[in-house]
Image (tube, rainbow, N blue to C red):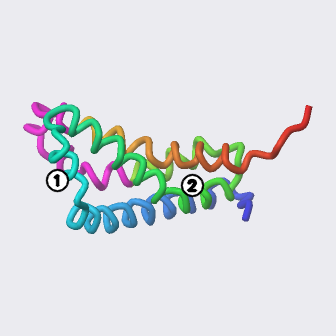
């Protein structure tokens, strides 16, 4: 499905990004409600920064897996324009997820607490595209 019209391809990437954001929000609502992982990690003695780091890493991996269908859709547009499509797909989700942060100036004082979420929101889809690209890279024979 290679779209030759660049504006239509960018619009398609935006739609894919919005759908991917909604999927992540929907899935993470259930994952957060039903996962025993934080309690299990705390029972193993993890607290503070090691616990938060472990949860961030695991959450990031789960988000990458959940982004694989969107990554596949973006790769189908036109590979040489993939960076443009990734930007078009990621930015609407980041704006939506952090819209209240941008509306409330006092939130900038506590910016550090938002960094892990912002990093995750900006990188999960590009990482999923890289994973998919490497998984389905044509084999080269020397």
Magenta range: 93-113
Mark 1 highlights which residue? 39
| Residue closest to the far left | 106
Residue 67 can be seen in this image: yes
- The x and y percentages for residue 102 are 21, 44
Q: Residue at x 67, y 48 (%)?
A: 135
Q: Residue at x 28, y 53 (%)?
A: 97
Considering depth in this image, is 53 or 100 the residue closer to the camera?
53
In which image quadrant can residue 27 be found? bottom left
Residue 11 can be seen in this image: no
Considering depth in this image, is 73 or 44 the residue closer to the camera?
44
Q: Residue at x 20, y 66 (%)?
A: 33
- The x and y percentages for residue 70 are 53, 60
Considering depth in this image, is 17 or 112 the residue closer to the camera?
112
| Residue closest to the far right | 142
Q: Is residue 107 magenta?
A: yes
Which dot, 2 or 1, sits closer to the camera?
1
* Secondary element type, mark 2: helix
- The x and y percentages for residue 67 are 48, 56
Instruction: Compute the Cα span from label 2 to label 1.
Output: 32 Å
Q: Quadrant of the N terminus?
A: bottom right
Closer to the chain start, of discs 2 and 1, is 1
Q: Is residue 27 magenta?
A: no
Mark 2 highlights which residue? 71
In which image quadrant can residue 5 be found? bottom right
Lateral position of residue 17 relative to residue 83, left or right: left
* Secondary element type, mark 1: helix
| Prevailing secondary structure of the magenta residues | helix
Q: Residue at x 46, y 51 (%)?
A: 64
Q: Residues within 10 Å of mark 1 (few under 14, many from 20)?
A: few
Lateral position of residue 117 relative to residue 77, left or right: left
């Amino acid at each position: 499905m290679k779209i030759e019209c660049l504006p239509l391809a960018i619009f398609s990437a935006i739609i894919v990004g919005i759908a991917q954001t909604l999927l992540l929000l929907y899935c993470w609502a259930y994952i957060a409600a039903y996962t025993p992982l934080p309690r299990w990690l705390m029972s193993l003695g993890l607290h503070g920064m090691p616990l938060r780091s472990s949860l961030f890493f695991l959450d990031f991996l789960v988000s990458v897996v959940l982004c694989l269908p969107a990554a596949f859709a973006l790769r189908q547009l036109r590979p040489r324009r993939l960076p443009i499509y990734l930007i078009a797909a990621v930015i609407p989700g980041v704006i939506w997820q952090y819209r209240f942060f941008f509306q409330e100036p006092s939130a900038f004082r506590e910016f550090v607490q938002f960094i892990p979420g912002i990093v995750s929101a900006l990188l999960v889809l590009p990482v999923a595209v890289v994973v998919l690209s490497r998984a389905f890279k044509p084999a080269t024979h020397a």
